[in-house]
Amino acid sequence: DIQMTQSPSSVYASVGDRVTITCRASQQVSSWLAWYQQKPGKAPELLIYSASTLQTGVPSRFSGSGSGTDFTLTITSLQPEDFASYYCQQAVSFPWTFGPGTRLEIK
Amino acid sequence: QVQLQESGPGLVRPSGTLSLTCAVSGGSITNNNWWSWVRQSPGKGLEWIGEINESGSTEYNPSLKSRVTISVDKSKNQFSLKLTAVTAADTAVYYCVRTSSGGNWFGPWGQGTLVTVSS
């Protein structure tokens, strides 16, 4: 299985800040990587796929980059609704696997 | 817009069988997609269980394969999950979700249903 790791596990930030979350795969996944946002008590929602393509309706303050084994999710100018958990997922080989998540909390 | 809704018992006895159904609305289950089950527990985060397509072809997570069966009912536009020999470690929120035909991403998701394994 491809193991996914994320850092940091939690981050504190303020409205208006810029935040970067990193995701690393244990093997090459090319650009077969997705990012999800999950709010408490809700299902995850797809934010970014193919490492850098924004899902329809996702604000442009979200961006993704990377390929191979190292990826980043950047949120510029944090909004109150962005405080949530974020997960990466590799989509190159079975079984599909997720990172452990990064919790973005208000400072 | 496709919507998914899980249903099934919220409590299952240890060694019993967990059975869940996912109703798909707003679109056909036969629309060249795969349909997955994903679960989330505090101890293990998000875990993909398996997926099925309209033809009934399946892929399962090897960690659960011996206990999992996913099936599809095209006439009812739904698919189902059975997990046998459950233990407390199977306590989780279970989500049904569409696996994108374009790239193995997940969305949209059902709201999720909590299944507790306890006597």
Image (cartoon, rainbow, N blue to C red):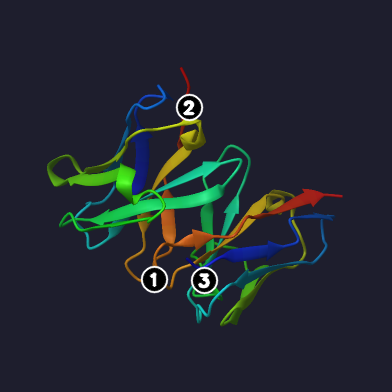
Q: CA distance from mark 2 to mark 1?
A: 32 Å
User: At 52% from the left edge and 71% from the top edge, which residue is drawn?
Assistant: A33
**Residue A89 seen in the current view:** yes
> Which of the 4 image quadrants contains residue A92?
bottom left
Say if mark 3 contacts mark 2, CB within 8 Å: no
**Which residue carries the number 2 mark?**
B116
Q: What secondary structure is marked by label 1?
A: loop
- Residue B103's label in the rendered image is 1
Residues beneath discs 3 and 2 located on the same chain: no
Q: Give the camera-side residue of B72 and B118.
A: B118
Q: What secondary structure is marked by label 2?
A: strand
**Which residue carries the number 3 mark?**
A33
Report the chain holding disc 2. B
User: At 51% from the left edge and 79% from the top edge, which residue is drawn?
Assistant: A31
Q: Is residue B89 above or below residue B70?
A: above
Foreground tag (3 vs 2): 2
